Amino acid sequence: MTRQFFTKWFGCVFLLALVGAGVTNAQQVDVRSSVNATTIGTEEALTYTITVDGSDGSNIQIPPAPASDGLALLQTVPGTQQSVSIVNGQMSRSFGFNWTYRPTRQGKATIAATIVKVGDREYHTQPIEVTVVPQDQRPARQRQTTPFDRIFRSPLDAPQTAEPPTPDDSDLFIRAIPSARSAWQNEQVIVEYRLYFREGIQLRQSRLTDSWDAEGFWREELDVETRPIPRITVENGLRYNTIVLKRAAVFPTRAGEMSVDPLKIESEAMLPFGSRDPMQSLFSLGTRFSPVQLASPKVTIESKPLPDGAPSSFNGAVGSYAMTVTPDRTSLDVGESLQLTVTITGQGNLATLDAPRFDIPAAFEMYDPYVSSLLDRSGSRLGGSKTFRYVLIPRTNGTFDIPPVQFSWFDPGTGRYRTTSANPIPVTVTGTATAPDVITATTNGMPVDDFAPAFKSVGSWYRLKTVSLHDRLWTWFLVLLPVLVLGGAIVWQKRSDRYQNDVRWARGRRAHPLSRKHLKQAMETLRSGDTRGYFEELERAVLGFVGNRMNVAEKGLTRPQLDDLLADRQVSEPTRNRLRHFLETCDRGRFAPASFSPENKEEAFDLASSIIPDIDEEVGE
Amino acid sequence: MMHRSYRSVFMAVWLVLASMASNAQDASVVQQFDEGTASLENGQFREALESFEMVEATGWVSSELYYNTGLAYHRMDQLGQAIRYLERAQELAPDDERIQHSLSIARGRQKDSFSVLPLPFWKSLHMSAARALPPGIAFWLGLICWIVFFGFLKAHLLFDRHSAWHNRGRTVAGIVGVVLLVHAFGTSAFSPFDVRAVIIEGEISLREQADPDAREVVQLHEGLIVTREGVASGWVFVEIPNGTQGWIPESALAGI
């Protein structure tokens, strides 16, 4: 009783002293409830604590003791505690109110939720369930002691145990916390390993027992604090200190279900009473710490394949990125170098990030890029930048555009592919190429890995054929021409032969041309005023035609002989009469030309012109 | 009489040679070519291309013109067009080392690499014959033989030339003339060479149907030479070297 009173009195004084220190750092208020054990014996007491974090203490109303079922409250006025911690220069305070309960029966017991008022706001705690077992079946656990317990303990009291107590699984464990259980292929997943240990437990000489591995993943370690300050957290109603042992970024390299190995450590743990009991320390100097082996559970991650529809510039990057493209200059001479720096920044697997693909003008020679990475492992995710420095050397002068550099990645946040593209970079190259010092020509004088130079002159010009040979008519005509020529020659030859051998036929063929010739001659004679000559030509035209057509010598014929010949060849009487009349007219014209008027002359001409075809028609073949 | 027969043959040959000699190009064409070449060497590739296109528009071409055009496109990083003109240049000058070298460089920069289907023997034979004796040359040679044949025939029919020498000459000239003319017109009408085209877009999908939503057969890249098989509403049915067939947009192709 004296000890309990002293403890409470000392706690109140300490609380007031800290409040008086005037710590006024405003923080987010957090209220949580916890018990010292979730399984107790029927003869044990249960301590229930409400902790308020983030308040300066001035506006906390002392909460009422929560109602209980299967437990009896031993005190109505709570005990109070306060602690102050400074992390990274930030001061935080924690206030605690605790009550003691004693079980009234075996089985399940519950401490109900209660309300804590901090200023104007109300915070609700969670109900806590505990199990009450017979006293002899209660789990071994450390006693909650204070330094004053040791002071007021009788030296005659027997030591509680000769062996240091061993913490059970609920006192000390490692938890693996992945940022996601399902991820896209090559997506960043953070796996954090947290050590949970009950308040008062001390650890030393901790080390990894196995090499940690994650088969099927690309792994990158993230920084954790080398001297971590434990954070208090409540798990299943129990208060724990937690520290981060390890934080790693893993990237699934293939699709499917894959596992990250457990993190295993060996350490030596000292339970609170084992380390703080001066008497036990006196009698068991080397055994205050007991060896413990801890292992986190295995973490399984389902990796999904990336969706279809990746752009052509995608080369496997997954995360969130940005790209900059910077040339060191845009004007240079032939043979000088241009450095093109492509920097990709963002969060993702930068170590395996490939250089973005882009084409350069053929006039440029490009070397493999110099690659440098700067990874930021200090944050909660792996990020940083990767730089590709390309060296480009122009071989010829001119103005060129370095095409836009494109970079694509898969954004797991939106589940879509994204592409960023830099602007094209105009580059002006001046000067001419100097003689190379290295071998740049093949054995036949051609440049290595480049086109041969331009032709300065043309050997042969060709007419561009827009029409095919077989579609040109003149080609067919040229082919047929010899046939036509030969055919014509044969016909001409035969005609010549007939002219020579067939007089009747030859005279008949000449009858018309000669008669036309004489008629034409008659007209010319008439125009010259020679009437006599005119009628002579008319008579010659008609008689000549009759002689040729009938193959007779017309000059020696008398008029009656002529008439008989025509009658023999079936020439009609009217035609013969007209011929007689025409010949008489011609006779008169030759011997008395003055008696003919111009009309009479034309009439004679018309008569001659009409008689010739009539005779030709009636004579027949 | 015999003199007249020989004279007609001589006249025919003279006509043929005179028509071939009339293929002399205009001086302005040469001047334009020289200007384009000068621009090309000064790095003014667009100006060079303009000059070369003006030359081509006149209807006069040469392997050198095509080669320089291809080189200008290459300098402008248009691989498809460069290959297109180098292929044209090689058709005119298949044995030119400069063209062969540059074409091999250009082909080496292609992304696509397909196995090539072997040609049927008759097609190879026809192609060899067409290369050895192009239709134009075959036509003129065949026409000369044809005329000589008719000269002999005329001497035989009209001038009673019946010697053995005349008979043999007439037979040979007739057979050779007919064969050459059939080859010329046959090759012209039924060319053994495929209608080729080159892909001028960076990347294009070969699709099963002439529809942008049709299933993609394979992705093709700039510079690949395909065979045109047919056209339908802005799409071309093509065959790639390994025999796979499909449709691609007409705008992605340029004829060789």
Image: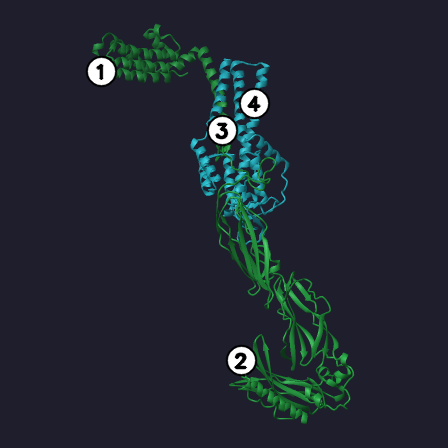
Q: Where residue B122 sits in the image (x, y, percent)?
A: 62, 35
State the SS at label 4.
helix
- Foreground of the two, B144 or A449: A449
Q: Which chain is cyan?
A: B
Q: Earlier in the sequence, mark 1 or mark 2?
A: 2
The residue to which callout 1 is attached is A598
Residue B174, numbered label: 4
Residue drawn at x 38%, y 11% as measured from the top left = A548
Tell me which amino acid carries mark 1: Pro
Q: How is the image coloured?
A: by chain
Residues flagged by tags 2 and 3 on a common chain: yes
> Do the residues indicated by labels 2 and 4 lie within the same chain of the protein?
no
Please tell me how crowded label 2 is: few (under 14), some (14-19), or many (20+) other residues with Cα within 10 Å: few
Which residue in the structure is indicated by mark 2?
A: A25
Residue A476: mark in rendering: 3
Q: How far across and how far down the image is residue A470, in percent?
A: 51, 32
